[in-house]
């Protein structure tokens, strides 16, 4: 499709032409739809990820970062309720039990739900670095069907960091932590500032999350260093 100057879209936002990046605020409106797909392989100047000194100890549960999060929140009956634990270095393990509400085909987990479980597990890695980041790219492989009632044993690790780009990978096994791999993913998270959420999120939820008297909860909702 030919791209001219900025055009209105059906969301009422401007579509940004290829060479017309908006500078300043980080957010969904900044990245042109025509942008190519940067590689999931770290560049040669990438560095090894560093664990934050205050990161939870290996084996410690990370807890939900936000109780309305579909991946880990406790406040959503049909959410995944994924529970992630810190592991060594910048890596985590997590578990998620597939519920009837998570079906795609009869008796089997929906692929999008499995991708969510991978995304959430990968996202939780950022807490170990105390970085605020969002998923930019998530490439998933579905290797085995995952039945309702089964536990998906996930593990994820951050592999490299290059500027704002965070490279990571994850896999999910069934039948036990050493069972066969059912799903796996490679991801590129992009570090953002707090205003990514405050400027793009719906005001009701932002206000509610910000006004929680528990400052640690406020910080975790946005994955900010408390
Ligand atoms: C509360 C904390 C969050 C925890 C939640 C855990 C849940 C799991 C995580 C999620 O599901 S997050 C929700 C899903 N993701 C999003 O909603 C992100 C939507 N996209 C955006 O908001 C923007 O596109 C984004 C912030 C990712 C990037 O926009 P920017 O304008 O800040 O970045 P910019 O375009 O300047 O690119 C910076 C670098 O990142 C690269 N990049 C940006 N977007 C990319 C992308 N989508 N894929 C690959 N690379 C990307 C880009 O090529 C560039 O590389 P170089 O520095 O080498 O030039």
Image: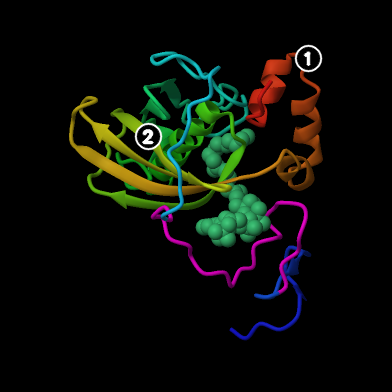
Q: Which residue is label 1 attached to?
A: 213
On the rendered image, what quadrant is the C terminus found in? top right
In the rendered view, how is the structure colored?
Answer: rainbow
Q: Do the residues labelled 2 and 1 touch (CB within 8 Å)?
A: no
Quadrant of res 178: top left
Measured as percent of width and height from the top left, residue 79 is found at 51, 31
Nearer to the camera, 139 or 53: 53
Q: Check the image and report above or below for 4 versus 23.
A: below
Circle 2 crowding by C-alpha within 10 Å: few under 14, some 14–19, many from 20: many
Q: Residue 156 carries which label?
A: 2
For this orientation, the residue located farthest to the bottom is: 2
Q: Tell me where residue 128 appears, x and y as whole percent.
A: 51, 26
The circle drawn on residue 105 is: none
Picture residue at 75% right of the left edge, 34% below the top: 205
Measured as percent of width and height from the top left, residue 11 is found at 73, 63
Give the residues in magenta. Answer: 20-43
Local secondary structure at mark 2: strand
């Amino acid at each position: 499709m030919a791209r001219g100057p900025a055009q209105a879209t059906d969301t009422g936002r401007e579509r940004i032409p290829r060479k017309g990046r908006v500078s300043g605020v980080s957010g969904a409106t900044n990245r042109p739809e025509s942008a190519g797909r940067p590689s999931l392989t770290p560049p040669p100047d990438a560095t090894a990820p560093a664990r934050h000194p205050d990161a939870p100890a290996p084996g410690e549960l990370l807890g939900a970062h936000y109780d309305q999060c579909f991946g880990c929140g406790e406040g959503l009956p049909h959410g995944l309720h994924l529970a992630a634990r810190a592991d060594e270095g910048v890596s985590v393990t997590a578990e998620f039990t597939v519920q009837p509400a998570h079906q795609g085909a009869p008796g089997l987990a929906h692929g999008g739900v499995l991708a969510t479980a991978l995304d959430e597990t990968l996202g939780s890695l950022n807490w170990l670095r105390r970085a605020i980041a969002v998923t930019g790219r998530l490439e998933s492989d579905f290797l085995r069907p995952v039945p309702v009632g089964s536990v998906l044993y996930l593990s994820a690790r951050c592999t490299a960091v290059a500027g704002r780009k965070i490279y990571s990978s994850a896999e999910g096994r069934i039948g036990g932590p050493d069972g066969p791999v059912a799903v796996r993913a490679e991801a590129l998270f992009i570090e953002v500032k707090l205003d990514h959420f405050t400027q793009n999120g719906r005001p009701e939820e932002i206000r509610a999350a910000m006004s929680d008297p528990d400052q640690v909860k406020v910080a975790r909702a946005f994955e900010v260093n408390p």
